[in-house]
Amino acid sequence: MYQAEAGLIQERGGTIQRVVLDYELKRQIYSPLAKAKQVSASEYRKRQAEVARENGLKVVRGKIPLPDLRIEYQTKEGETARVDLELATHHYHGSHMSAKAQAGFKTYAAEGSRSFLSRVLDEHDITAELLSL
């Protein structure tokens, strides 16, 4: 997944600056939210939205979906950009796929899982593109 996406970034003239793994994002998200547990529900939702926005993520159905991998890079034009990647497996349910799609993640699937996951997307009317590995 990384190799495929890194190749696309480099083909477009981009330079990879950093790779962020899910555990790093979890720390960046959950540490500030743990401190906000003692506030009212509405204040917590505000803080959750703020933390998500600060980390370039979205709140989907009251949660912050996290990608498996984030690639931060510089475009050919010198702008800072990032792409959030998800590796979907045949264990994914419709709601899981839906949340990841709504979060805007670029989703990859192994060839053996692709047909199953495509059916899940169709059955649940989820708009997302599955890229093959």
Image: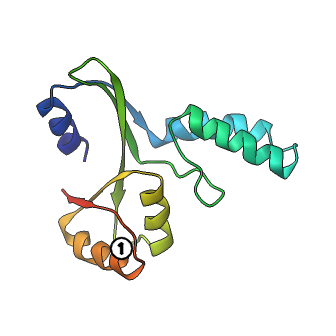
Asked whether 55 or 28 is in front, the reply is: 55
Give the quarter of the image for residue 89.
Answer: bottom left
Q: Is residue 5 above or below residue 41?
A: above
Residue reaching furthest left? 11
Q: Is residue 118 left or right of residue 42?
A: left
Total number of numbered discs in the rendering: 1
x and y percentages locating residue 98 in the rendered image: 46, 66
Label 1, residues with CA under 10 Å away: few <14, some 14-19, many ≥20 = many
Q: Is residue 45 visible?
A: yes
User: Which residue is at a point 43% across and 66% down the rendered structure image?
Assistant: 97
Vertical relation: 60 (above or below) 54: below
- Amino acid type of the residue tagged 1 in the rendering: Leu
Q: Residue at x 18, y 66 (%)?
A: 111
> In the rendered image, is residue 27 in sight?
no
Report which residue position mark 1 lands on: 121
Q: Position of residue 77 (x, y in %)?
A: 24, 19
Report the residue that reaches farthest toward the bottom. 123
Seen as rendered, the residue at the extreme top is 78
Q: Position of residue 8 (x, y in %)?
A: 16, 39
User: On the rendered structure, is 32 left or right of 43?
Assistant: left
Residue at 47%, 52% in the rendered image:
103
